[in-house]
Image: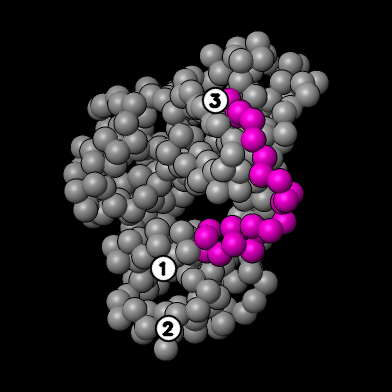
Amino acid sequence: MAFTLRQLQYFVAVAEQGSVTRAAQNLSISQSSVTEALKELENDLGVELFDRHPRGLSITHNGHQFLRHATKILSTVSDARTSFSGQTNEPGGTLNIGVTSLVAGYVLSDLLARYRRACPGVEVTAIEDNGGYLEHLLVGGELDVAVMVISNLRDRMALQAEILETSPYRLWLPLGHPLVSADIISVADITREPLIMLTIDEIEENTGKLLSALGARPHVAFRTRSVEAVRSLVATGAGVALLPDLVYRPWSLEGDRIESRDVSGSLPVVQVGMVWRKGSNLPQAARDFVGIAETMRSGRQR
């Protein structure tokens, strides 16, 4: 029997939540329905999508590969359902977007793909830069809208921001690291480990503030602007990383496993959102872009 869209929805929910219980709660269905759907999907595909263990579930390499296909299928179906909801006349015009480095590959790509399908007549230009410079361009009217990290938005008097996604920080560890099996991981545990530091957006600033608040100076083993480099370094045992869950993937490019664990205590969160100038009369192309982003946010929250 071929797999169903409902099975894909349940699979994606479990993969995103890391728990059948939380996925069932978000979907407002029973845990048994989710468990049965996963079992039927695995039987149909002939592979195990999750490893079962006492602490819950962890996605397998096959599951991680299938997740990309599943999300793409569900996205295409969603686009098909809404393809006739717009105006009859194809919109045109231009859209000037700004994006910060952390957001470019993890939020904007899917959002931009949906927008291009919905508004193929719009000419889109995008610029990637740091948050401060994008704020300058927004205030100056050189950008219509930016998709960026807004946790530390500076000019809140001149700019309007709307949250798309909130991502907590988690600890990345190589497979077999002693902390992987720890019941509780504290920030103090992290200060004793070599740290791989990501230096884009406000990540380094937030991580430094968090650790220095404990009176401990972190041992930074490596600084990089590349998330993929962080993955490879962590997976091969060069150190650990404290990063927002937004950019977590369980495998490095070389195919090595990366574990992710919660850390006790009050950790910062990264807020990703849309930003535009307050009081500006957004062109129709920008209003459509904001509307599609809001639809995506609503879909993730259901």
Three-letter code, disc 3:
Gly
Structural crowding at the residue carrying mark 3, measured as other residues with C-alpha within 10 Å and reported as few (<14), some (14–19) or many (≥20): many
Q: Is residue 271 above or below residue 61?
A: above
**Of callouts 2 and 1, the N-terminal one:** 2
Three-letter code, disc 2:
Ala
At mark 2, the secondary structure is loop
Work out which quarter of the rendered image holds the C terminus and state it: bottom right
What residue did someone put label 2 on? 2
Residue span colored magenta: 74-96
Residue 128 in the image: state x and y as whole percent: 46, 24
The answer to if 137 sits in the magenta stretch is: no
Which residue does the image show at 34% across and 36% down from the upper left?
227
Structural crowding at the residue carrying mark 1, measured as other residues with C-alpha within 10 Å and reported as few (<14), some (14–19) or many (≥20): some
Image side of residue 199 versus residue 287, left or right: left
Task: Work out how far the residue at label 2 is from the one at label 3, CA to CA, in angstroms.
Answer: 41 Å
Image side of residue 148 versus residue 217, left or right: right
**Of callouts 2 and 3, the N-terminal one:** 2
Image side of residue 96 versus residue 37, left or right: right
What residue did someone put label 3 on? 98
Task: Work out how far the residue at label 2 is from the one at label 1, CA to CA, in angstroms.
Answer: 24 Å
What residue did someone put label 1 on? 57
Three-letter code, disc 1:
Leu
Which residue does the image show at 45% across and 80% down from the upper left?
3
Q: Nearer the viewer, residue 182 or 62?
A: 62
Task: Work out how far the residue at label 1 is from the one at label 3, CA to CA, in angstroms.
Answer: 37 Å
Q: Residue furthest bottom?
A: 1
Q: Is residue 28 above or below residue 142?
A: below
Q: Nearer the viewer, mark 1 or mark 3?
A: 3
Which residue does the image show at 47% across and 20% down from the upper left?
129
At mark 1, the secondary structure is strand
At mark 3, the secondary structure is strand
